[in-house]
Amino acid sequence: MDVTKAGTGAGTALKVANSGTGAGLQINQTGAGQALRIVANVAANAGVFAALVEGYDYGPSLTTAADGGTTFSITKNGVGNGTGLSITNKGTGNSIEVRDASAQLFAVTAGGVPKWTAAGNQQTTVGAAGAAAALPTQPAKYLKVQDSAGNTFVLPAYNP
């Protein structure tokens, strides 16, 4: 099936409306080609997203069915100063979560604070004292982090 919108004015070339509970659009790709490719490389599209996915409670979910492949990859081929990945969180939940098969391991809060959530990623002691060089007299800044219990700490950051 080919769908072509010959006019250059506003309007939708293909619209699928589904009031049922099944998939509104399903693509089964059994060959070696790409199941979906969106090309929007016209200069008039500058500043316009090539794809916009909106959901009420959930956005897109990407899942691979077999091991060995990359589930999601972002490649910025342009050499300009545009951002490679931008996350806007207007809510209070985490902006980023890193999980294994059973639990959350690390997160970045809506306020931008790194947060480790796996108790195994923290400890209260270190090895025996060694012959390390002395630290500079004063840290340049402090980085806020949260532990698995939600306590906020600051880590000193020194200029090299």
Image (cartoon, rainbow, N blue to C red):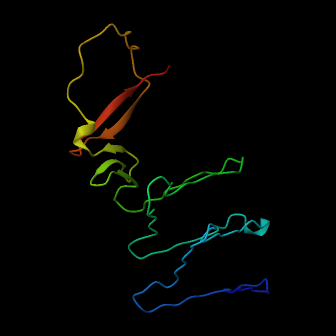
User: Image quarter for residue 2?
Assistant: bottom right
- Residue sticking out furthest to the top: 131
Tell me which residue sits at (44%, 92%) in the image: 19
Tell me which residue sits at (61%, 51%) in the image: 83
Total numbered badges shown on the rendered structure: 0
User: Image quarter for residue 7?
Assistant: bottom right
Q: Which residue is nearer to you in this view: 95 or 90?
A: 95
In the displayed structure, does residue 120 sit left or right of residue 157?
left
Q: Considering the image in quadrants, where does the N terminus appear?
A: bottom right
- Residue sticking out furthest to the bottom: 19
In the displayed structure, does residue 5 sit left or right of residue 82?
right
Tell me which residue sits at (78%, 65%) in the image: 43
Q: Which residue is nearer to you in this view: 43 or 156?
A: 43
Question: In the image, residue 152 lies at what x, y percent?
Answer: 27, 40
In the displayed structure, does residue 92 sit left or right of residue 127?
right
Q: Is residue 15 above or below residue 61?
A: below
Q: Is residue 131 above or below residue 66?
A: above
Q: Is residue 145 above or below residue 100?
A: above
Tell me which residue sits at (55%, 78%) in the image: 27
Q: Is residue 33 above or below residue 126?
A: below
